[in-house]
Image: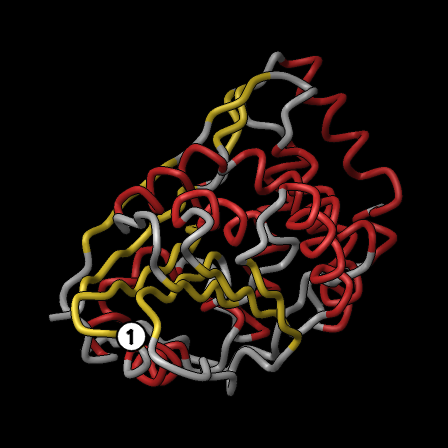
Amino acid sequence: MDDGSPTGSPTGYVLGNDDPALARLDALSRVYAAATAAWLDAAGLAPGPSVVDLGCGTGAVTLAAAERVGPTGRVVGVDTAPQPLEVARRRAAAAGHRGVVLEQADVTTWEPPGPVDAVLGRLVLMHLPDPVALLARLARAVRPGGVVAFQEVVLSTRAASPPLPLLTAFNGWLLTTLGRLGVPADLGLRLGAVFRAAGLPDPALVTGQPLERGGDASGWSIVGGDVTALAGAFERTGTVSAAEVGPADFEQRLRAQAASAGAVLVDPLVVGAVARLP
C-alpha cells in the first residue's frame, strides 16, 4: 500500500531562509490566503483551544489560527530557522496576539510540553524524511476530539494559458530536481494515505487552486523565489546549469512573457487534510 512516503529521502528544506526566500513565503501566503482560510475553517478552530503550527515560517498560518482561537486560546508556532521566526514575532506583536508563542526547534523531533487541541502545518510535510512517523507522534499529543490538519501542494499542476516557454522549462527543472532530491512534489495528492498510515481517521480534504492573470500575478514571485533558491540544486543534481536558467532576471523575463501573452497563471493545487480524533 502506498503510505504517501517518497521513494527517496528528502534532504531537508531546500527553498532557503534568507530575505529573497522570505519574500517568496509572503507571496505564497497572499496567493493561498483563501485556500488556507477554507482549510482552517474546515478544522473548526473556535475561541479557546491550544494549537500548534509546525513549520510556521513567517507566521501566516500561526496568526490566522490565533485570530480564530481568540485571546483565550494559545498558538505555538515552531520553525527550525531563526529568520522567519523573527518576522513572525514582529507580526504577532503588531497584531496584538498575546497568546502566540514562537519557538525555534527541530520540527522533526519537537513535541508540545502537554496535550493540545490541534496540530497544524502548511507545506512542511514534503520537506520531512518521515511524515508518517511525525504525524503519528504528534497525534499522541492531541486531546480526544482534537484535530490534526496539514496542507500540502501538488506542484505538477502549475500551468499557464497560453503556455509560456519559461514556465514550461521551470516546471521541468523543478520536478526533476525535487525528484532527484527525494522531495515529494505532489504530496498533496497523498495526504489521505499519509494520514491513514499514521493511524489517523480518514481526513476530510479541502482543495484550492488560485488563478491569476497577466504579468503582475503574485504567483510569478513564487516561481522567481524558487528559481533563486534552487539554482544551486539545479546544477548539483545535473538538471540544468545556472547559465541556462539565468536566475538573476528569470522572474522579470517570465513576467514579461506573461504580460505579452495576457497569460492566465494556474497556481499549483493545494490540498488540506483535516482529521478529528475520536
Residue with the mark numbered 1 = 142
Side of 167 relative to 121 (left or right): right
Which of 271 and 201 lies nearest the eye of the viewer? 201
Which percent across, then down, holds residue 205? Answer: 23, 50
Question: As displayed, is residue 241 above or below residue 5?
Answer: above
Which percent across, then down, holds residue 171? Answer: 57, 47
Side of 272 relative to 172 (left or right): left
Question: As displayed, is residue 12 above or below residue 97?
Answer: below
Which percent across, then down, holds residue 231? Answer: 78, 59
Task: Residue 96: name its quadrant.
Answer: top right
Question: As displayed, is residue 160 above or below residue 259?
Answer: below
Colouring method of the image: secondary structure
Side of 4 relative to 108 (left or right): left
> In which quadrant is the C terminus drawn?
bottom left
Which of 53 and 252 lies nearest the eye of the viewer? 53
> Mark 1 belongs to which amino acid?
Val
Which of 59 and 199 lies nearest the eye of the viewer? 59
Report the residue at 73% width, 30% height from top. Answer: 254
Side of 6 relative to 197 (left or right): right
